[in-house]
């Protein structure tokens, strides 16, 4: 059976072996549970789980999925994320629902698909035998067409994403997970987390395919 990524290559991908328990950045195996920055000030979200560190060749695979419509690569990398999540939540409470980071309609028309939504759908399917999850796609709306975060310096990302999202109603949840492909500075998922917590959500976890090392 043909596979988009062979088993040997999958095993060579930079799996997120240890990360900060708050912001999710990759840390050395002998590092404390929380990085120095989170010890000073924790992020607005509660934790971040990823499948991989955002480095070669994962960065290439993600770009192929996102910008070149190579969706054939999505299932194998989602497999790794689902395995990581099953491990991390073993014996812990799971979120009540997952919320993919929405695209603005203009970018959706240009790209032809929403990679975070496709990732979330794959996760719901793969996690179904272990933990049934609701996919919540209407709770958050992207109301502002922003410049791509990837092309901006870390210092510009917060201003770019500010007020980019809005709520479509009051959430009927206490515990949610936000799903995105890559988390870099965390400004996008933090902006959504603020909205959710302002509306009464108590805990928000972040799930992503890849987390970058500390960008600052």
Image (spheres, helix red, strand yellow):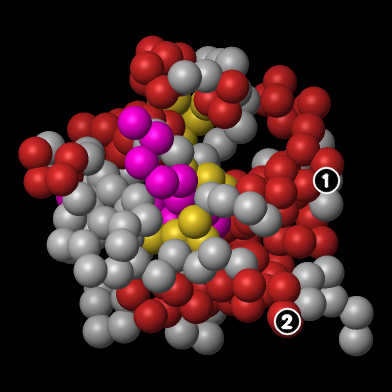
Residues under numbered marks 1 and 2 in contact, where contact means CB atoms less than 8 Å apart = no
Residue 185 screen position, x and y as percent: 39, 34
Discs 1/2, front? 2
Tell me if mark 2 has few (under 14), some (14-19) or many (20+) residues whose alpha carbon lies within 10 angstroms of its own: few
- Residue under label 1, please give it: 69
Circle 1 Cα neighbour tier, 10 Å, few/some/many (<14 / 14–19 / ≥20): some
Distance from disc 1 to disc 2, alpha carbons, whole Å, reads 22 Å
Q: Earlier in the sequence, mark 1 or mark 2?
A: 2
Q: In which image quadrant can residue 10 be found?
A: bottom right
SS assignment for the magenta stretch, majority = strand
> Pointer 2: what residue?
7
Locate residue 63: give its quadrant. Answer: top right
* Residue at left offset 17%, top offset 55%: 34
* Residue 48 horizontal/vertical position (percent): 34, 54
Residue 39 lies, with reference to residue 90, above or below; the image says: above
Q: Is residue 19 magenta?
A: no
From this viewpoint, which residue is outermost toward the right? 2
Q: Residue 45 placed where, x, y %?
A: 26, 45
């Amino acid at each position: 059976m043909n596979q988009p990524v062979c088993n040997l290559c999958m095993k060579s991908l930079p799996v997120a072996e240890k990360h900060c328990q708050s912001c999710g950045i990759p840390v050395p195996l002998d590092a404390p549970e929380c990085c120095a920055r989170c010890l000073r000030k924790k992020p607005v979200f509660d934790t971040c789980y990823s499948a991989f560190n955002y480095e070669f060749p994962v960065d290439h695979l993600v770009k192929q999925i996102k910008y070149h419509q190579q969706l054939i690569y999505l299932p194998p990398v989602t497999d790794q994320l689902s395995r990581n999540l099953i491990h991390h939540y073993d014996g812990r409470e799971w979120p009540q629902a997952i919320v993919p980071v929405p695209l603005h309609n203009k970018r959706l028309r240009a790209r032809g698909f929403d990679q975070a939504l496709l990732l979330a759908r794959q996760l719901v399917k793969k996690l179904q035998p272990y933990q049934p999850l609701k996919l919540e796609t209407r709770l958050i709306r992207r109301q502002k067409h922003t410049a791509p975060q990837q092309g901006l310096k870390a210092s510009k990302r917060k201003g770019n994403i500010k007020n980019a999202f809005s709520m479509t109603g009051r959430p009927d949840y206490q515990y949610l997970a936000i799903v995105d492909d890559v988390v870099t500075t965390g400004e996008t998922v933090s902006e959504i987390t603020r909205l959710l917590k302002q509306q009464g959500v108590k805990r928000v976890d972040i799930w992503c395919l890849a987390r970058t090392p500390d960008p600052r």
